[in-house]
Image (spheres, rainbow, N blue to C red):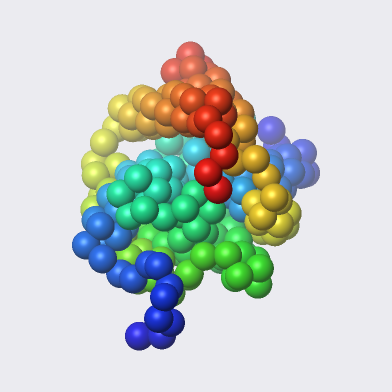
Amino acid sequence: MTGVVLYVSLVLFGALTGVASGLLGVGGGTLMVPFLTLAVGLTQHQAEATSLLVILPTAIAGTLALRRRGVGEAGVALRFGVVGAVGAVLGALLALALPASTLRLVFAGFVAIVGVRLLRDGLRAHSRAETG
Amino acid sequence: MRDVAGRPHGISRELLAIGALGGALSGLLGVGGGIVMVPLLVLWARYGQRDAHAASLAAIIPISIAGIATYGIAGQVEVWPAIALAVGSIAGARVGAGLLARIDERLLKALFGAFLLGVAVLMVVRR
């Protein structure tokens, strides 16, 4: 993909991941990284780095929207997120030390595990009475 | 600090561990880390599903800043594609957050799980 087509599809795909982000409380990177490597042709490292740059404003927008609706407590979450920032630096350094092909397999394995777990949880909980 | 009496969630050892784990995963894989933080918040920190989603989203803010800085120093960040994606995703996030108040969470989980399995297969096949 090149030029205008590339950027239009990026905006559209961004909208899709944004909805998922607002709904699931995840930043959308699970969707964006495969998109950036498979469709846009970035390397695994570039895709992950770029994904994080999208996740930041998305998470800010989602948090503000939830706050207006009185859902959740951002203060506590931001505090444990600061501890998470230390973990993020270590994780990124590990990723940068790995070859792209290895990192991609690790990523695919991670997405598969998450997919199986979400599917299982969703189906199992669905047959149970609602507890709120 | 500003905690009102009766609010269910203060900062705790569990929350700090969940943050550190989510952060490490975020940095390694370029994801928000919510995928590991949300279930841990529910199972370990006893958050409700909806509160867990909200807390995870807020925790991702400092976590992603740290990841961006690290990858940025290594010269891996592609700014223009990120801006294009962000334009769409900010609009989308508002829609998604609005839906969160009234969606069937379990159906959502099942659908998203099935979708992710497809993504994983594609990533391995098209290498």
Q: Nearer the viewer, residue B119 or A26?
A: A26
**Image quarter (top left, top right, bottom left or bottom right) of the N terminus of chain B:** bottom left
Q: Nearer the viewer, residue A115 or A41?
A: A115
Residue A114, percent across and down?
Answer: 43, 31
Side (left or right) of A123 relative to B91: left
Q: Which residue is rendered at x = 38% and y = 60% of the image?
A: B63
Side (left or right) of A92 relative to B30: left
Residue B78, percent across and down?
Answer: 52, 51
Residue A17 in view of the camera: no
Of all residues, the one furthest to the bottom in this rendering is B1
Indicate the quadrant where residue B124 lies: top left
Indicate the quadrant where residue A36 lies: top right
Residue B21 in view of the camera: yes
Q: Which residue is rendered at x = 30% and y = 69% of the image?
A: B11
- The answer to whether residue A49 is above or below residue A125 is below
How many discs appear? Answer: 0
Residue B61, percent across and down?
Answer: 46, 64
Q: Nearer the viewer, residue B96 or A129?
A: A129
- The answer to whether residue A58 is above or below residue B7 is above
Q: Which residue is rendered at x = 66% and y = 68% of the image?
A: A69
Q: Which residue is rendered at x = 67% and y = 45% of the image?
A: B103
- The answer to whether residue A92 is above or below residue B112 is below
